[in-house]
Image: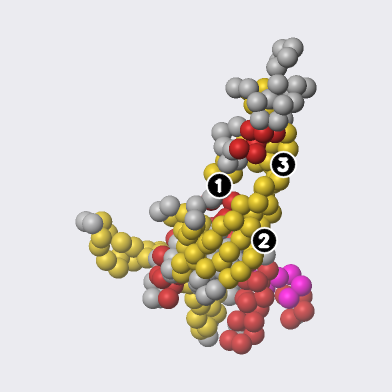
Amino acid sequence: MGTGEFCAACGRTDVELIDGICAECTMDRTTLVRAPKRFNVVVCPTCGARRVGSHWERSGSSRLPTGEDLTPALEAHPEVGIRTVRWEETGSSALLHQYIGRVSLRFRGIEREVAVPLTVKVDHHTCPECSRKSGHYYTAQLQLRGPLDGPREKAGTLRARLDAQWDELMREARADWRTAISWREALPEGWDYFLVNTMAARSLARLAQRRLAAEMKESATLYGRKDGQDLYRVTICVRIPPSRREAAGSS
């Protein structure tokens, strides 16, 4: 900035100029942040997962759009740094939601908040995992059983014990292991869990082995072919002994 230089828009002489315009006037004349007229969010109505490109993520999320869904719709000017975004819903219908994004930003050393309107269309599509679950598709069967040695437990007592120990285990299990469980069946000898992810079944079995002193045995059976490759279903038998407290109480 040199002596006698002034902003061609507002006339100020005490600020830095770029191309003869101060930053404040440039901000007034520039679209700092924009959003498309309509933005689509694809949500699985069963589990809340979002489709991002060609894959699905965030299973267990809200079925309604959140800031995590909306903020990626914003397009900022190359010189703008976005600090925070607050979204306010201003109206909605069955599938369309109107929002105002309150965007706190910084441009050439000046901070400002701008309001960005956004209309969001929510498309509901069942994700592949929920689709497989609804068709009772599975790749692994996890059998929860009592120990081979020791006193035999009545069917109801055994299932109740295994159920309580399984719930305890689930508090430590990763979210993707839990969501891989499709359904379960009650049997006189315990529980059978059916999973759509073999690695998740193995991980749960190993967790039971470490935390509950369980024994595990794995086997595989051929159930079909795809693209010239054999397809196998894995069965993992997990034998869980009573906890020390339960064993002491029954003695």
Magenta residues, start to end: 240-246
Closer to us: 96 or 21: 21
Residue designated by label 1 = 34
Residue designated by label 2 = 88
Quarter in which the C terminus is drawn: bottom right
Q: What's the distance in space between the residues labelled 1 and 2, CA to CA?
A: 16 Å
Q: Residue at x 63, y 22 (%)?
A: 20
Q: What SS does tag 1 mark?
A: strand
Disc 1 crowd rating (10 Å Cα; few below 14, some 14-19, many 20+) is some
Query: Residue 106 in the image: x percent, y percent?
Result: 69, 36
Closer to us: 19 or 178: 19
Side (left or right) of 174 relative to 233: right
* Pointer 3 or 2: first along the chain: 2
Q: What SS does tag 3 mark?
A: strand
Is residue 236 within the magenta segment? no
Residue designated by label 3 = 112
Query: Residue 48 in the image: x percent, y percent?
Result: 54, 67
Query: Residue 45 in the image: x percent, y percent?
Result: 50, 72
Is residue 243 within the magenta segment? yes
Tell me, yes or no, if residue 101 can be seen here: yes
Side (left or right) of 18 relative to 125: right
The residue type indicated by label 3 comes to Arg
Tell me, yes or no, if residue 193 can be seen here: no
Q: Is residue 151 above or below residue 97?
A: below
Do the residues under discs 3 and 1 have CB atoms within 8 angstroms?
no
Q: Residue at x 60, y 81 (%)?
A: 159
Q: Residue at x 25, y 62 (%)?
A: 225
The residue type indicated by label 2 comes to Glu
Q: Nearer the viewer, mark 1 or mark 2?
A: 1
Side (left or right) of 203 relative to 3: left
Disc 2 crowd rating (10 Å Cα; few below 14, some 14-19, many 20+) is few
Q: What SS does tag 2 mark?
A: strand
